[in-house]
Amino acid sequence: MVVDCGGGTVDITVHELAGVGGRLRELYRASGGPHGSVGVDNEFEQLLANIFGTDFIETFKAKRPAGYVDLMIAFESRKRSASPYKDMPLNISLPFSFIDYYKKYRGKTVETAIRKYGDSDIRWSAQGMLRLTQAAMRKLFMPTILKIKEAVGAVMIANDSSGIQHLFLVGGFAESPLLQLEIRKEFSSMLKVIIPQDVGLSILKGAVLFGHDPTVIHVRISRQTYGVGVLNRFVKGKHPKHKLIKRDGIEWCTDVFDKFVLTDEPVTLGNTVIRSYTPAKVGQKLSIINIYSADKTDVKFITDVGVKKCGTLQLDLTKVIDKVPARKRREIQARMEFGDTEVKVSAVDIDTGISVKANIDFLCK
């Protein structure tokens, strides 16, 4: 298992070393969530709001944006110094613009607000800094660390943790001694936790190695069900009546989700699924194939809950329409190629050899 803890997200993958040559087989689809180190920043901002008031913090961000950036830079430096093995408090320098603007906004000093807050772990130092004990800093980390542990635990449960022997903790956030300690405490009894040297550069190095040999991962797990929306011959008793349409005197069932690959299905590198379709109407001049995705595997129609449109193929059928017999329906061949870092989609007009490609929008709503 690789747990990549970055600034914005945590990404979790599970691979098996398969055979000779160091090839990897993905055992569980990539997962994770928005549990990066920015969550610690959000907790610090919430702490400031509790001490000085939400209205002041929002106004300060709007009126003194440069001062707010300086404040978060100062916190970032102290955040990196947080450690469960140190007792020395951490001093966060509040910009002069913050101190001055608060006095004008509230009519009292920053020191007064901190004292009124009444937390012994949070004080105002004689040097004019916000002083947090290591315990106070740990409180800012824990909500995010708990979410990371829950995400890792969920993957282990889904995979039957007995088969996972190693956990590699990598990424910029993984440099945090607090995160390292918590992950070791939680999971070292079940598997071996490995934290490489230059943990923050591990992802970059891996990307470079993958660029040299993209075939190193030869089996991936499909994160979603992918397919296209098509018309099928209407079958009474099988298809709902409200999906019935007629074209050239033929009864069709509309909005059918023709699935190419299912969620959690293993796909090898270069695995290609090919389907052939014909336009619903004779003499049709434009063929539009919409690509859809869904988390579930049992979806039947593109109108089902959870189905999202994530791409479109438009094939122009006018260029040699005169060369095709009038009553002949053109054959359109749709292809989806899986197993790489992206899903490649294309469509070919068999009569002309004209092809089009499309990109899948993985941020589709």
Image (spheres, rainbow, N blue to C red):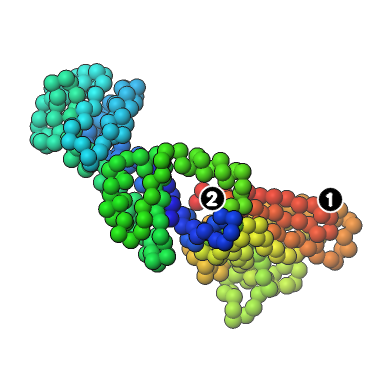
For the residues labelled 1 and 2, say whether their Cβ atoms are less than 8 Å apart. Answer: no
In percent of width and height, residue 353 lies at: 82, 54
- Residue 360 image position (x, y, % from top left): 60, 51
Q: Nearer the viewer, residue 131 or 240?
A: 131
Query: Residue at coordinates 67% horizontally, 60% vertically from top-left?
Result: 272
Question: What secondary structure is found at the residue carrying circle 2?
Answer: loop
Q: Nearer the viewer, residue 70 or 276?
A: 70
Residue 135 at x, y = what percent?
Answer: 18, 40
Q: As shown in the figure, which amino acid type bears the numbered disc 1?
A: Lys
> Closest to the observer: 349 or 176?
176
Quadrant location of the N terminus in the rendered image:
bottom left
Residue at left offset 57%, top offset 74%: 240
As displayed, is residue 92 above or below residue 359?
Answer: above
Residue annotated with mark 1: 319
Q: Residues within 10 Å of mark 2 (few under 14, many from 20)?
A: few
For disc 2, the marked residue is 362
From what the image shows, is residue 222 above or below residue 363? below
Report whether residue 37 is seen: yes
Q: Is residue 285 left or right of residue 153?
A: right
Residue 302 seen from this side: no
